[in-house]
Amino acid sequence: MRLKLPKLHNQIVIGLVLGAFFGALFKVNTHRLEIKYIQKNEEKLIIAQNWEKLAFLYDKDSIAFNTNQQLDIISYFDKIKNKNPKVIIENFFSLKEGKYQQVRILDNVISISKEVTIALSIRWVGEVFIKLLNMIAIPLVLASLIVGAASLGDIKKFARIGAKTLALYVFTTVVAISLGLTIANIIRPGEIISPFTKERLLSAYNTELKSKIQTELDFSISKMITNIVPRNPFNAISNSEMIQIVFFAVMFGMVLTMIKREKAEPLIIFFDGISEVMIKFVDIVMLIAPIGVFALIAATVSEFGFDILQTLIWYSLTVFIGLVIHLFVTYPIILKSLSKISVKNFFKNIKRVQLVAFTTSSSAATLPVNMEVCQDNLKISKSITSFVLPLGATINMDGTALYQGVASLFIAQVFGIDLSFFQQLTIVLTAVLASIGTAPVPGVGIIMLLVILKSVGIPEEGIALIMGVDRILDMCRTVVNVTGDAVVASVVATSENQIVN
């Protein structure tokens, strides 16, 4: 009797659950620091645990932290390490030496960091899984969009389907950001956070924020439109400039319909072959999906845990409630009204896509899986999935837009800024434009949030308040992003009678 393995999406769920347990079991100790320093030209390591006091002494100044301020210590050291501070630790347990020490003074400290647990050490397995999916994404987007645009046949059909797709993506994004703002105005999470928590978060994440935002963002509609057109398409491909790749591929496919069929046919067959190879590649890569998911979730839970959610529980709940409503209310209404695909059948078949999106936090990495599921499970024609889904992975960021609306209001509320109706309307418009220009990769929403904050005069340092929970919420909002892509593909396919029976 042969052992029957569970279906792939069930294997992924098992990997996710086991990964969460493994990460919780080997959780990073928030009361432990690994301190590397130079002594007699030799690098040494001390692992300090449960310290009573850790102080930095430099330029006749000093500042002290207690055992509950691990993140603050790491962040503060990163700010002042160029000043070569003395590090003084009092009443701590030295893990390497296995005994308590009253005081230790360290010179020439080169790094202070959290411990690396077993769960963190296997993160590379998950990163390989994401890289494999990203490796497939670029050639798949290029080939699929060329074939998709060429298969539409004529400019009128291309314009009709393109207009429907863009209109639906913009509509769902506007609904998402408006929903986020509405819920944030009702719950008002920024007024619930304590001044102590505010100062602690600003201190802990300000350095990380500065490292993420190293250049001044100069955002404008004209610049965004100009950046859509690649100067060199090969350079755009090598740098993964997704919006430029989409523009080039769509234009290439459209122009193929304007030349003689006998000359266009070999190119269409060539790119169609690449598209088929990439889709088959997805099947092979998904064999290691449960292992990749296990490693990614284990590392995330180990490093961040769920403790940070307690600090920002109301903000996190506000974002989560908005995402759930958009996922299970907005999308079903659209499907019920405008699509032949039943809501039950849609969510039953989209589970695997949502699980991959949740673990990878990347719309681009999930795109190959989304295309395969929409074609094989939802029976949407290849000509629609090849055009609508790659475009959606690039410009449709409903979950990101909703989060940006909530985050903007949350930060404004924390700083006591009362935003007017017109300022909130500006957030809606800016978030829609920002979501179009947002790259489909993990964590980039933080960068685009800076644009929105600047548009209404909210202090940009407020982003440091939400960075602690961004990784976890990024996983949730990516699920909404990719689900929105599939919803729009279902609607467009229905309107064009492209559901294959």
Image: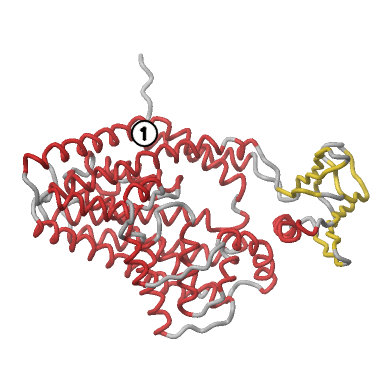
Q: Residue at x 38, y 79 (%)?
A: 425
Asked if residue 221 shows in the view, the reply is: yes
In percent of width and height, residue 462 lies at 58, 71
Q: Tell me if 38 is positioned left or right of 242 in this view.
A: right
Q: Secondary structure at mark 1?
A: helix
Vertical relation: 380 (above or below) 64: above
Q: Nearer the viewer, residue 272 or 293?
A: 272
Asked if residue 337 shows in the view, the reply is: no
Q: Nearer the viewer, residue 462 or 145?
A: 145
In percent of width and height, residue 442 lies at 47, 52
Q: Tell me if 362 is positioned left or right of 22 in this view.
A: left
In percent of width and height, residue 20 lies at 54, 42
Q: Residue at x 82, y 39 (%)?
A: 44
| Residue lying at the far front of the rendered structure | 231
The residue pinned by badge 1 equals: 8
Looking at the picture, which amino acid does disc 1 mark?
Leu
**Quadrant for the N terminus in the image:** top left
**Quadrant for the C terminus in the image:** top left
Q: Nearer the viewer, residue 128 or 150?
A: 150
Q: Residues within 10 Å of mark 1 (few under 14, many from 20)?
A: some
